[in-house]
């Protein structure tokens, strides 16, 4: 089964804003509000960053925001900080047997 | 504090079997779906399987159905993954994950590494 499509890498300087896209289909992102974003630092477990397209769990800074348009979801990080350097994965509920599909991940480099 | 602690990973030969365990604490275990997600070295995340709160419903990724079995023991606050006929491509870190409605994975364990190699 095909996953969601993310750019392999993005970069930005401290203080700047970056956006990571995540493209799927009407069977997943386009059809449901259950889009999530996860942050993973090297050697660590993923951490939930955004759920239901744009909601932040308690403790996640409001520099992280999510949105969706059609079959594409986006994660925006404003005021980039060095500690934001990590891999970011999107996921979506899907109406296929897979139940949930992930993107391949985007490596964020803070220059 | 929610804690998920996996164990049982290690080196196994192709065709072998392994049982992963996950000890949960800090929340009412039988109120939640639980999930296994894996990550091959240097690769992305792959959902493996999940299980209903009472164990009555189980779902698997198509490619693994028949080789992997997910189960839980609510009396012991534990989640399990029985893996058989293991292949090199099953080499990965396996994460135990708490699941919210909508396939939202809100808490992750630290992971346990399974290496399938001769």
Image: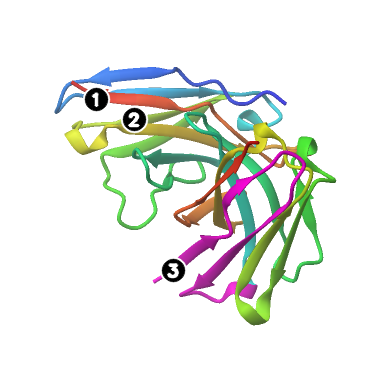
Q: Which chain is home to disc 3?
A: B
Seen from the viewer's position, the closer of residues A55 and A92 is A92
Q: Farthest residue toward the bottom?
A: B75
Between the C-alphas of marks 2 and 3, the distance is 28 Å
Residue A21: x and y in percent read: 45, 22
Q: Are marks 2 and 3 on the same chain?
A: no
Q: Position of residue A47 (x, y in %)?
A: 41, 48
Query: In the rendered image of this protein, does residue B2 appear above or below residue A78?
Result: below
Pick whichever of labels 2 and 1 is earlier in the sequence. Answer: 1
In the picture of the structure, the residue carrying the numbered disc 2 is A76
Image quadrant where one finds the N terminus of chain B: bottom left
- What are the residue bounds of the magenta stretch? B1-30
Front residue of B38/A58: it is B38
**For residue A55, side relative to residue B40 (left or right):** left
For discs 3 and 1, the disc positioned in front in the rendered view: 3
Q: Is residue A34 visible?
A: no
């Amino acid at each position: 089964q095909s996953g969601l499509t993310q750019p392999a890498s993005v970069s930005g300087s401290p203080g700047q804003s970056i956006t990571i896209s995540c493209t799927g289909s009407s069977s997943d992102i386009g059809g449901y509000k259950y889009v999530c974003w996860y942050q993973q630092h090297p050697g660590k477990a993923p951490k939930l960053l955004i759920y239901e397209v744009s909601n932040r769990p308690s403790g996640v800074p409001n520099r992280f925001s999510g949105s969706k348009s059609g079959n594409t979801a986006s994660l925006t990080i404003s005021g980039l900080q060095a500690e934001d350097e990590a891999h970011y994965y999107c996921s979506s509920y899907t109406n296929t047997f897979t139940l949930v599909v992930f993107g391949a991940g985007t490596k964020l480099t803070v220059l | 504090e929610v804690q998920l602690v996996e164990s049982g990973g290690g080196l196994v030969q192709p065709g072998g079997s392994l049982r992963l365990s996950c000890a949960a604490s800090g929340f009412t275990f039988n109120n939640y779906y639980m999930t296994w997600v894996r990550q091959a070295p240097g690769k992305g995340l792959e959902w493996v399987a999940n299980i209903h709160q009472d164990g009555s419903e189980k779902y698997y990724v198509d490619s693994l159905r028949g080789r992997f079995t997910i189960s839980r023991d609510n009396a012991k606050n534990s989640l399990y993954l029985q893996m058989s006929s293991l292949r090199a491509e099953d080499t990965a870190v396996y994460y135990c994950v708490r699941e919210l409605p909508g396939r939202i994975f809100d808490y992750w364990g630290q992971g346990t590494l399974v290496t399938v190699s001769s």
